[in-house]
Image (cartoon, grey):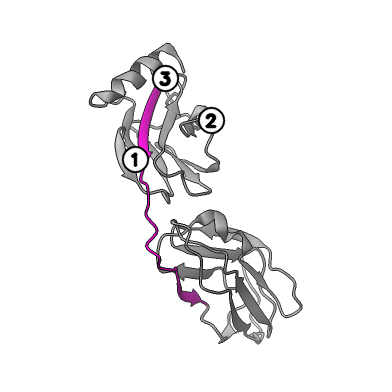
Amino acid sequence: LSAAEVTQLYSLEKPPPPLPSMIKSITPANGAVNIPVYLSTVQIDFNASMNKSTYSGIQLKDASGNLVAGSIGPGDNYYQIHPYNLLKPGTTYTIHIPADLSDISGNTLGQSYISQFTTETPVPNGVKPTITSVSPADDAKNVPISTKTIQLNFSEPMDRGTYGGIYLEDASGNRVSGSTGPGVNYYQIHPYSLLKASTVYTLHVPASVSDSTGETLAESHAFTFTTETPVPNGVKPTI
């Protein structure tokens, strides 16, 4: 930590210091407590259009100084960090914002800034999570081959780090390639290509998928749907 950050850190026992003029807000707020361990977005909003190339120095770290792995959302006047996994319970996290952060006019923050929040300590309730719905629905027929999203919805906030065993496969057992959308209480698969026509697909969900308190699904699931057989309409596509 820089000398300025150390001074600010010790002052956090008092009301949080005011935000630098360049920063509009930080979520979670500086000094916030009982933040859910399943927090999906840390966001900094700015009062100006920013030079996004200077965002790279923004970091989220745990109490031991370990960098929190996650995807990022660099907007013109905001910056987001989306943790891949649950945050640690009862832990103070620190958002580090570097002094050389600048707007498109070249104005810099001038002094590094830190903002802290502390996570909750969730108590297991003994209730296992459930899958509340799936899309396409189980045993659905004539599903468009152009389907862009396969989605599972869960009954409560989940541990996104346990989603890795979920996959979609065709009738030959080939896994479907696609990007994923791991939400707090949902999981999405976005196929890169058209699905095969007249084909049964199976969405596999292992019993190891768990909620934010460690409770797992009661059992594994396999949902199926069958794609349509599209009929050429004789109309050529145009640009």
- Amino acid identity at mark 2: Ser
> Which circle, 3 or 1, is nearer the viewer?
1
Query: What amino acid is at disc 3?
Result: Ser
- The residue carrying pointer 1 sits among few (fewer than 14), some (14 to 19) or many (20 or more) residues within 10 Å by Cα, namely some
- Residue located 46% across and 45% down the image: 87
Label 3 secondary element: loop
Residue placed at 69% from the left, 83% from the top? 199
Q: Residue 56, labelled with which disc?
A: 2
Q: Is residue 17 visible?
A: no
For residue 155, the mark is none
103, 171: nearer the viewer: 171
Please say whether residue 232 is visible from this viewpoint. Answer: yes
Q: Could you say which is closer to the camera, residue 29 or residue 142?
A: 29
What are the residue bounds of the magenta stretch? 112-135
Gap between marks 3 and 1 measured at Cα: 18 Å
Element under disc 2? helix
Where is mark 3, residue-wise? 112
Quadrant assignment, res 49: top left
Residue 220 appears left or right of 43: right
Above or below, 106 relative to 148: above
Q: Amino acid at mark 1?
A: Pro
* The C terminus - image quarter: bottom right
Q: Magenta segment: does it hold 22?
A: no
Q: Earlier in the sequence, mark 3 or mark 1?
A: 1
In the picture shown, does residue 116 fall above or below 199?
above
Mark 2 or mark 1: whose residue is earlier in sequence: 1
